[in-house]
Image: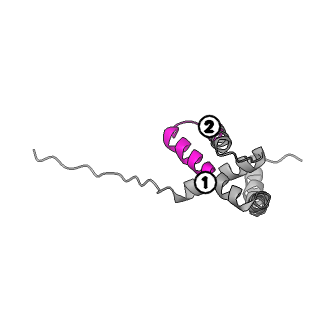
Amino acid sequence: MQLNDWELTLIVQCVFPFITSLILPLGAWFYHWLLSKLPANQQSVVEANVEKAVKAVEQAQSLVPGAVKKEYATNLTNALLKTAGVKATPEQVDTLIEAAVYQFNVNRPKQVTAAIPAVPSNK
């Protein structure tokens, strides 16, 4: 049995929200589980350094693709954590960067574009 384009589109439209509704809570649970593995004072230091790194990369590298920005943020976070003497696993840093980027994008003001009507000339 071969599916044509509209059948495949229909399946994707029905299955994608279901899969997304499963993945997002699992991601949130995983984030909280990873945080629970760090001592409380280290959690706040790691979160603060990740937020600083993400904001710095977003401001300085706004036109760069997301994967490159993530690499910059990871490297900057690791350097900040090393300076602070705090250890975190790569999985913890990765998850915290994803959470910080999500929060950054949620809090970012929406860009509003509007068409400016043409002004008639007085000739």
Residue highlighted by disc 1: 48
Disc 2 residue crowd, few under 14, some 14–19, many 20+, Cα 10 Å: some
Q: Residue at x 53, y 44 (%)?
A: 56
Residue highlighted by disc 2: 72
Q: Could you say which quadrant of the image residue 70 lies in?
A: top right
What scheme was used to colour the molecule?
one colour
Q: Residue at x 69, y 45 (%)?
A: 85
Q: Work out whether residue 4 or residue 116 is closer to the camera in this orientation and state it.
A: 116
Q: Is residue 39 above or below residue 66?
A: below
**Mark 2, secondary structure of its residue:** helix
Nearer to us: label 1 or label 2: 1
Q: Work out whether residue 19 or residue 8 is closer to the camera in this orientation and state it.
A: 19
Q: Bounds of the magenta span? A: 49-73
Q: Could you say which quadrant of the image residue 42 lies in?
A: bottom right
Q: Is residue 44 above or below residue 83?
A: below
Q: Main secondary structure of the magenta part?
A: helix
113 is within the stretch colored magenta: no
Q: Work out whether residue 63 or residue 19 is closer to the camera in this orientation and state it.
A: 63
Q: Residue at x 47, y 56 (%)?
A: 110
Q: Could you tell me how far apart the alpha carbons at marks 1 and 2 are, in whole angstroms?
A: 16 Å
Q: Amino acid at mark 2?
A: Tyr
Measured as percent of width and height from the top left, residue 114 is found at 37, 53
